[in-house]
Image (tube, rainbow, N blue to C red):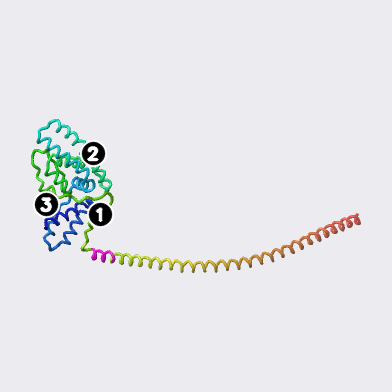
Amino acid sequence: MADQELVEIADELYALPLSDFTPARDARAKELKGTDLAAPVKALKKPSLAAWVVNLLVRRDAEQVDQVLSLGAALRDAAAGMDGAELRNLTKQRRQLTAAVTTGARALAASAGVKVTQAVADQVEATLTAAMVDERCAEAVRSGLLVTALASTGVDEVDLSAAVATPEALGFTATPVEPGPPDLHVVPDPDADEKAVAAAQERVESAAAAVESAEKALSAASQSVDELQARSLQLQAEIDELRRKLAELETASEEVDEELSDAEDSRAEAEASLADASKAHQEAVAKLAKVQG
């Protein structure tokens, strides 16, 4: 019963995005603390990228995987029956099918936000080939619980002890996932409350720091306003004083202009009197000279 539960938990964990596997596994093991499943769950290994892609393919495109495994069974039957022509024909189909399915697996990974390099794609294709030529490798692939990529020539038996999450994986069929966002088990975080409190405390401290900073900014701005208001009043007083002086100077200027006008009139009269006196003087001098002569 415990083995079956372990496989079911592994089925959920190995269906997760690769980056979520480790934290989800650790949280689930912590949730199971005190039970017989805690240690086995904690011991589940994170799959390699190639293994994760194959696991994704098994869950998202089971029909393609069934086609691969069916062709593999036909290949093994042809090899057992020593049917050379059929074996050559099926081998050609195998190469075409594994290449096509690998391309599809890369596309599935890309849709999940994971880029698959050619080196990883080669490991995926090698795993599919191993599933075709080796019946136990086919079981490992169908489980969706691969930890590493597989390789087999179909001659020597493959050691699968470290290739799958748990020995009970062989004979298990991965739970299919419909295309689109996967409906996966969300492992509750046992530290959620503590993390929420810590996050809330951090927000409170951040907000308090923001308030203190805003208060300092307000104080500085208020001081600046007070200083500028005082300076504005001072300048306004200086402007008023200058306007008063300007008014006095304008009045004085008007008075000087009037006095200047009067002085110019007096000068004109004096010039006229001087001209008349000079003329009379000249005439008197002329008469005197005439009498004396």
- Rendered residue at 18%/33% (across/down): 92
Q: Amino acid under label 2?
A: Ala
Q: Secondary structure at mark 3?
A: helix
> Alpha-carbon neighbours of circle 3 within 10 Å: few (<14), some, or many (≥20)?
some
Disc 2 and disc 3: Cα gap in Å? 30 Å
The residue singled out by tag 2 in the image is 100
Give x and y (percent) for residue 161.
10, 48
The answer to whether the residues at label 2 and label 3 have Cβ atoms under 8 Å apart is: no
Disc 3 and disc 1: Cα gap in Å? 24 Å
Disc 1 and disc 2: Cα gap in Å? 27 Å
Mark 3 / mark 1, whichever is N-terminal: 3
Is the C terminus in the top left, top right, bottom left or bottom right quadrant? bottom right
Q: Secondary structure at mark 2?
A: helix
* 98 drawn magenta: no
Q: Which mark is residue 165?
A: none
Q: Amino acid under label 3?
A: Glu
State the residue in front, 272 or 61.
Answer: 61
The answer to whether the residues at label 3 and label 1 have Cβ atoms under 8 Å apart is: no
The residue singled out by tag 3 in the image is 168
- Rendered residue at 64%/65% (across/down): 249
- Rendered residue at 18%/58% (across/down): 26
> Alpha-carbon neighbours of circle 1 within 10 Å: few (<14), some, or many (≥20)?
few
State the residue in front, 118 or 109.
Answer: 109
Kindly report the secondary structure that dominates the magenta region of the rendered protein.
Answer: helix
State the residue in front, 285 or 211.
Answer: 211
* 196 drawn magenta: yes
Q: Which residues lie in the magenta part?
A: 192-200
The answer to whether the residues at label 1 and label 2 have Cβ atoms under 8 Å apart is: no
* Quadrant of the rendered image containing residue 154: top left
The residue singled out by tag 1 in the image is 183
Mark 2 / mark 3, whichever is N-terminal: 2
